[in-house]
Amino acid sequence: MSPTNVDLHCHSTVSDGWLEPQALVRRAASNGVELLALTDHDEVSGIDAAAEAAAGLGVRLVAGVEVSVSFAGETVHIVGLGIDHRCPTLVEGLAALRAGRDGRARRMGDELARCGIAGAYEGARRFARNPALVSRAHFARHLVASGVMPDVKTVFDHYLARGKPGFVDHRWAPLAEAVGWIRAAGGIAVVAHPARYRLSSADMARLFDEFAAAGGEGVEVVSGAHSDDEMRRFATVARQRGLLASRASDFHGEHESPVDVGRCNPLPPDLAPVWTRLI
């Protein structure tokens, strides 16, 4: 029987979520989620704990990951679903991505210090449960806790988005390489929250062209980051390009995410759900 409540993109403390993997699964179960993917950024070490918790709660857990990609001057995220999280090709690729994160975080701290915000790197590390994954979200949480800004979104708008004083550019994985890691691990590659990317129409079309050429198969039509209009836009993209459609909250935490785990909109009924390939 096909599940009715599916959430195929969320984060734990292994990357930049607020909840431990087990606690995230418990929250999903209490919200009626039947099929859940844990998709931490460039990291898969929370999957075993999440799978153990899911088995005890009657939730099907999909092993997943969210891979950071550089494309057309933007950071784009590709979700891998149904992966073998022990696949050497994937594990080695993700380790290489994580190796560059600490240097990036230290540079962000330096840039913020030039703006008069001292100690931001050390503060961000205190919010990161995984020291190999100090992200912009951890810097934002530190700045909120320090009273610099009222909320995480405002921090990003003023300091951490591209072109702002705390932003540090970084070279992530090439698109075809990231999709290749996911496919090597037996997974399905999905473009995450495409409406978030500041890409021209031509670059967005090229993103999907190159993604499909590399073996990518899906797109997040429903995302916690998408408005109703954006959902309709990418439903059209899925139809026109023959892509599988995903439903995802991109949940990070109760007070930080616009949509709770398992509480996002349903997929338009004429689309082909990606989870038919996962169950």
Image: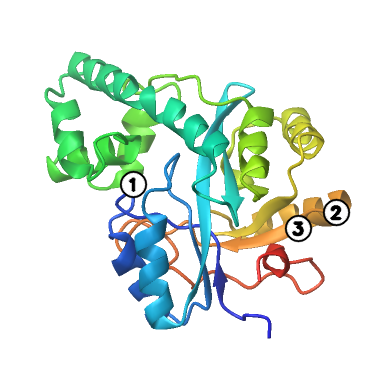
Q: Amino acid at mark 2?
A: Gly
Q: Which mark is residue 244?
A: 3
What is the CA distance from the residue labelled 3 to the residue labelled 2? 7 Å
x 56%, y 78%: residue:
5
- At which x and y percent is residue 200? 70, 30
Q: Residue at x 41, y 73 (%)?
A: 54
The local secondary structure at tag 1 comes to loop
**Closer to the camera, 265 or 20?**
20
For marks 1 and 3, the one nearer the N-term is: 1
- Mark 2 lies on a secondary structure that is loop
Q: What amino acid is found at the position of numbered circle 3 in the picture?
A: Leu
Above or below for 104 versus 17:
above
The amino acid at mark 1 is Asp
Residue designated by label 2: 242
x, y percentage for residue 8? Answer: 55, 62
Please tell me which residue lies in front, 96 or 138.
96
Tell me if label 3 and label 2 are in contact, CB under 8 Å: no
Quarter that holds the C terminus: bottom right
| Residue where numbered disc 1 is placed | 16
**Is residue 64 shown left or right of residue 31?**
right
Q: Residue at x 42, y 31 (%)?
A: 95
